[in-house]
Amino acid sequence: MDISPSELMIVSASRALAGNRTVFVGVGLPNIACNLARRSHSPDMELVYESGVFGAQPARLPLSIGDPTLVSGATSVVSMADLFMLYLQRGLIDVALLGGAQIDRYGNLNTTVIGDYATPKTRLPGSGGACEIAINARRIFMIMRLSKRAFVSKIDFLTSPGHLDGGDARQRLGMPGYGPDKVITDKALFTFDNPEREMMLVELAPGQTVESVQAAVGWPLRVADELHEMTPPAADELAIIREQLDPQGLYR
């Protein structure tokens, strides 16, 4: 079966969401992953969008967090301030999906600048709600394509905190959420299931090796004692992605 790297990421993220009820959703690949989960194994999942929509049931894939399709059938539509204060900061979000331009070994994200802040090579969109989400959601899943440009030893700007400098750094600062739990990429899957809260390779995409993944990461990679292969998408999952969620192939 011909499967694209993006489809592998979408399905892996969707499966990882099983068992979670409230999920904070962004646009792009996270959007497809959450809607795939709701249309397959988790029909009762509540999709939460930054624009103020709780319990969204979009009839089609939303083009942005401001797409009117999010409102129809939603449980609640409130202001962004109410969404963040009454849902996110109260600890009612099980999982949030984030991405970024850069990520380091502890899951800290940069979406602000590449290069020096005052004279950057590239100025990025910034935080939006990502910093608040990274602090307050119970757990964070990242979806990013694996490359040495993105997986760096030191990020140029800390936009959204991961596990900071590792260990119990988040707890010492009083951050309520656990922080990054998984990083889902097109070549591998990582977790932070160790005392140092360091990104750890646990699964390889078909055809990948530890060496090929290490070549795309800017620090000496921590590898789990037991490595597994990422399970390829099933035919029914691909059908939902290709026929219902992204028939034009904009993201997959």
Image: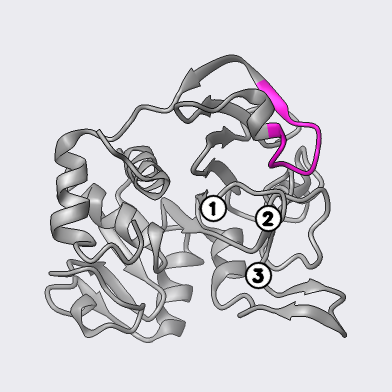
Pointer 1: residues within 10 angstroms few (<14), some, or many (20+)? many
Q: Which residue is mark 1?
A: 144
The residue at the point 58 percent across, 60 percent down is 134
Q: What's the magenta region?
A: 214-223
Q: Which residue is mark 2?
A: 150
Pointer 2: residues within 10 angstroms few (<14), some, or many (20+)? many
From the top left corner, tell me how far across and down residue 214 is, in percent. Answer: 71, 33
From the top left corner, tell me how far across and down residue 3 is, in percent. Answer: 32, 40
The residue at the point 68 percent across, 55 percent down is 150
From the top left corner, tell me how far across and down residue 53 is, in percent. Answer: 30, 76
Q: Mark number for residue 111?
A: 3
The quarter holding residue 86 reads bottom left
The quarter holding residue 59 reads bottom left
| Mark 3 or 2: the one toward you | 2
Q: Is residue 70 above or below residue 23?
A: below
Tell whether 174 sits left or right of 87: right
Image quadrant containing the N terminus? top left
Q: Earlier in the sequence, mark 3 or mark 2?
A: 3
Q: Amino acid at mark 2?
A: Ala
How far apart marks 3 and 2 lie (CA) works out to 11 Å
How far apart marks 2 and 1 lie (CA) works out to 8 Å
Q: Name the dominant secondary structure of the magenta segment.
A: loop
Pointer 3: residues within 10 angstroms few (<14), some, or many (20+)? many
Q: Earlier in the sequence, mark 1 or mark 3?
A: 3
From the top left corner, tell me how far across and down residue 106 is, in percent. Answer: 72, 45
Secondary element under disc 2, as helix, strand or loop, is: loop
The answer to whether residue 178 of the structure is visible from this angle is: no
Q: Are marks 2 and 1 in contact (CB under 8 Å)?
A: yes
Q: Nearer the viewer, residue 15 or 94?
A: 15
